[in-house]
Image (tube, coloured by chain):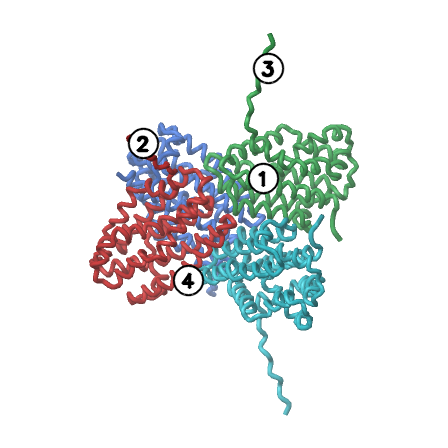
Chain colours: A green, B blue, C red, D cyan
Amino acid sequence: MKMKPKMKPKMKPKITERLRADADVIWKKIVEHPFVNELCAGDLPAKKFRFYVLQDYNYLMAMIRVLSILASKAPEFLIGEILEIAHMESTTELDAYEKLLNELDLSLNDAMNVKRMEASSAYANFLIATSSLKSFSEGLTAVLPCFWTYTEIAEAQRAKLKKNVNKIYVEWGSTYLSNDYVSLVDKIKSIVDRSCEQSSYKDLKTTFVTASKYELLFWDGAYKGPTK
Amino acid sequence: MKMKPKMKPKMKPKITERLRADADVIWKKIVEHPFVNELCAGDLPAKKFRFYVLQDYNYLMAMIRVLSILASKAPEFLIGEILEIAHMESTTELDAYEKLLNELDLSLNDAMNVKRMEASSAYANFLIATSSLKSFSEGLTAVLPCFWTYTEIAEAQRAKLKKNVNKIYVEWGSTYLSNDYVSLVDKIKSIVDRSCEQSSYKDLKTTFVTASKYELLFWDGAYKGPTK
Amino acid sequence: MKMKPKMKPKMKPKITERLRADADVIWKKIVEHPFVNELCAGDLPAKKFRFYVLQDYNYLMAMIRVLSILASKAPEFLIGEILEIAHMESTTELDAYEKLLNELDLSLNDAMNVKRMEASSAYANFLIATSSLKSFSEGLTAVLPCFWTYTEIAEAQRAKLKKNVNKIYVEWGSTYLSNDYVSLVDKIKSIVDRSCEQSSYKDLKTTFVTASKYELLFWDGAYKGPTK
Amino acid sequence: MKMKPKMKPKMKPKITERLRADADVIWKKIVEHPFVNELCAGDLPAKKFRFYVLQDYNYLMAMIRVLSILASKAPEFLIGEILEIAHMESTTELDAYEKLLNELDLSLNDAMNVKRMEASSAYANFLIATSSLKSFSEGLTAVLPCFWTYTEIAEAQRAKLKKNVNKIYVEWGSTYLSNDYVSLVDKIKSIVDRSCEQSSYKDLKTTFVTASKYELLFWDGAYKGPTK
């Protein structure tokens, strides 16, 4: 007797899965961006990498402000988790960042005084504006691509990273493959899934896609390097 | 020959010193408040202490939100310090709070579901409103009496605390005499002194005095206990 | 043949109707508050009315700030409507307020310099905190009782107002029976109904009930008059 | 006898004068921007003008939000003035804008649904971020170039506008020469001068120069027209 195949129960996709799917075109461009490709293959000019690292400072500072705004608006049971992330960015992450600067013979002071590229300012102001005027859920959705795209990049580039002999580039890439980093991304995704149920999906999508575009523009800007 | 006495150079008083002096009448009432006196002498009815501790929960949560708002607005070189305090409140401080609840046979859940006294809501909303609409400096000034009055209370009540045999009350009081706590207060005072120089002293004073009044109202409410 | 009675289609009640029902106990106390009863009957001591009017200034200023915050967060199609109300409060309403002060031989300057009663500060800070940290919908719900209770008061007191011979008191009461005022309240209610559909009803209810309690406390404070 | 020449008393320059001088290089580029030159001479391609006008919608909406944020934070004596400007933008200005759209055979709906150019989003988010996180004075300074550059443009292009036969372009330009518009700009400048005295000039300058750069980028984007 032929058995009827067991039907897999159709699960409603998670919000983060829908968002990811709806930004797929942009994410494909991010994951295979020339900057990322060359970095992971080991042949990115040092000058471009230094430019990118220096540009990251002001963005990181803005991200800490944004996570603080989100902590202030979070539902009570989430305040601690958001603050934990904000604090981690302003301690562990900032320390790692300074270490990377030093390996490149740069200082935190160099980073503070660098001329900001427009792609970084625009992205930072988009995040501050969104978290200030919109709901906690929409603000957190804005912040998600910044964390999440890096795991996808590192996954997609894993093979290249293995053959890469540039110690600093390999170190950079392996951060985003570490358990700690992957757990962090999973945590943020899970908070978004838990807290966005009452939000309009259309608004969340616009926010997520816009943030993803700014990620792409950041890579474009980094690859192009300093203007003038 | 009579020597002219050496003149002590007249130092401009620090802003925190001026604020403290201008709130002196209120602070005297706080430091010798019946609730505080009885607590430190050991004869405060357990019921009143439990009420006070339960009321503290919502205030603590609001304080964490307020410190997050302040971190988001802080001048760049202070973001990390403010976030450190916010994080400490939502980890170390919240753990200590839960431990105290447990010693009183209470749970965090009891605290979450307690009916808030008006003095606590009013104080919390004052802090949120001030940090949201006013400058970083004014917001931080609003937060100062909450931290600082406790060191003055513990100092003023040190003798009583020594003779006190109520273990829980003594533990409560000695927290605010610890080096850690005193350093925390010194740190916040020093941030206020460094960051308020451009602010109007009149505005800072109004904010500091109002916050001090709310501290006093909180003790009044705690001493009165639950209404109805 | 007996006809089955036509069933009235059961309409889902509007959010504002549910909120009103859930705050009914408090609203009954507001509508028949001694201050309101005596005012509408004409036998409220002039001293108490003057105190109430003077206290209104700081609350009105806070309300204008709150409506501005809400305009900044409003969905695009509602920005204009919210700003219209904010502007009306800071022009027409402030002019009417100054006229009333003058009829009582008081000036705007007197109102600016009056010692604020705690019930007014607490209410104002609750509104600022709610509109700053919560969603547009929740912030607008916080603001609703302030506008809406006055039409209910004026309706409930209509008979008394007719016999009242105190010109100033009658003028005060008839404002809230005017078509302009009733339309304004209907407009705000309709915006709440349109914009709160995605919000958690439980949160909206807490906000609406809390705001209603502060309305009651304001009347209590006004009736009690100046302390000390 | 030779008279000593009377010394003109040296006046401390106003803050707005210093800001204007410190942004001079950028303002020169704005005032003689190809878009502006061709518009005022009458030979700007209609397609470019339509693109510019359509792009203005989202910026105008953001500006209304920004002015609302500023009203919520304004010192008490300025709330009314700021709200007056916000209200004017959302009524008179929006009406004039819709009229202009209609003259170009466009509707408000077209403007709402247009794909935003990055220069407009970036500028809008910069203004929202600045007014949200910084002081009232710094927020108002951010807003100033948007209003003020238009009077300088219209002044500089006055001769060209006189010979211009394109009715719509002339109408556009003459708006910014009208007494109403010039008074509005003078009013905002005077509020900045009155309210920025306690602010750090360095911060104000950074804000003013950044806003001026975004004005320039907006014209660049408008001249370039739609991408792809």
Residue marked by disc 4: C91
Q: Position of residue D103 (x, y in %)?
A: 61, 61
Q: CA distance from mark 3 to mark 2?
A: 50 Å
User: Quick check: do tags 1 and 4 share a chain?
Assistant: no
Picture quarter containing residue B22? bottom left
Q: Secondary structure at mark 2?
A: loop
Are there few (<14), some (14-19), or many (20+) residues within 10 Å of tag 2?
few
Q: Position of residue A71 (x, y in %)?
A: 51, 40
Q: CA distance from mark 4 to mark 2?
A: 57 Å
Q: Chain of mark 4?
A: C
**Mark 1 is on which residue type?**
Lys
**Mark 2 is on which residue type?**
Lys
Q: Nearer the viewer, residue D202 or C133?
A: C133
Residue marked by disc 3: A5
Q: CA distance from mark 1 to mark 4?
A: 40 Å
For discs 4 and 3, the disc positioned in front in the rendered view: 3
**Mark 3 is on which residue type?**
Pro
Q: CA distance from mark 2 to mark 1?
A: 50 Å
Q: At x 57% / y 60%, what residue is drawn?
A: D97
User: Quick check: do tags 2 and 1 share a chain?
Assistant: no
Q: Chain of mark 2?
A: C
Q: At x 44% / y 50%, what residue is drawn?
A: B130
Horizontal placement of A140 versus A111: left or right? left
Q: Is residue C15 above or below residue B21?
A: above
Answer whether residue A47 is visible to the viewer in this image.
Answer: yes
For discs 2 and 1, the disc positioned in front in the rendered view: 2
N-term-proximal mark, 4 vs 2: 2
Residue marked by disc 1: A205
Q: CA distance from mark 4 to mark 3?
A: 72 Å
Residue marked by disc 2: C4
User: Quick check: do tags 4 and 3 share a chain?
Assistant: no
